[in-house]
Amino acid sequence: MRRSRAARPSGPGSDRPEPDVEDAAAVAPEAVAELRAELEQVRTRLARSEREVQELRALGFRVAELADLVTELLAGAAAEGGPAFRQAVDRYADGV
């Protein structure tokens, strides 16, 4: 990826020669084409990232819904009590 450079003085009195206008004009179309291609790549990556963020948000929401459901089921089972519930929790804890 191309990075911009800070402008430095050129011409008389500097260690940098004055730019050749003809050379700049010849390079400019190539540079513009390169920058346009990079811009298109950035736009493509951004669109892909935005889609991935939306997908992750949807999955996160689904996980939260499932966690709520499990909590409700466990709360109901805990209210009923009994050794079967305790054994199920112990089996789950051993598996994790």
Image (cartoon, rainbow, N blue to C red):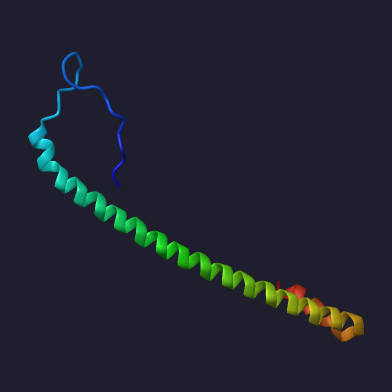
Q: Nearer the viewer, residue 20 or 80?
A: 20
- Is 85 above or below relative to 6? below
Determine which quarter of the picture holds residue 28: top left
Total number of numbered discs in the rendering: 0
Q: Is residue 81 visible?
A: no
Residue 62 percent coordinates (x, y) = 63, 75
Residue 1 percent coordinates (x, y) = 30, 47
| In this rendering, position of residue 50 left or right of residue 9 | right
Residue 84 percent coordinates (x, y) = 86, 86
Taking the spot 38% from the left edge, 60% from the top edge, the residue there is 45
Q: Is residue 50 visible?
A: yes
| In this rendering, position of residue 61 left or right of residue 55 | right
Viewport quadrant of the C terminus: bottom right
| In this rendering, position of residue 67 left or right of residue 17 | right
Taking the spot 74% from the left edge, 75% from the top edge, the residue there is 68
Taking the spot 81% from the left edge, 78% from the top edge, the residue there is 89
Taking the spot 27% from the left edge, 25% from the top edge, the residue there is 8
Q: Nearer the viewer, residue 90 or 52?
A: 52
Q: Nearer the viewer, residue 93 or 31?
A: 31
- Is 66 above or below relative to 33? below
Residue that lies at the very extreme toward the top in this rendered image: 13
Determine which quarter of the picture holds residue 4: top left
- Is 59 above or below relative to 80? above
| In this rendering, position of residue 25 left or right of residue 39 | left
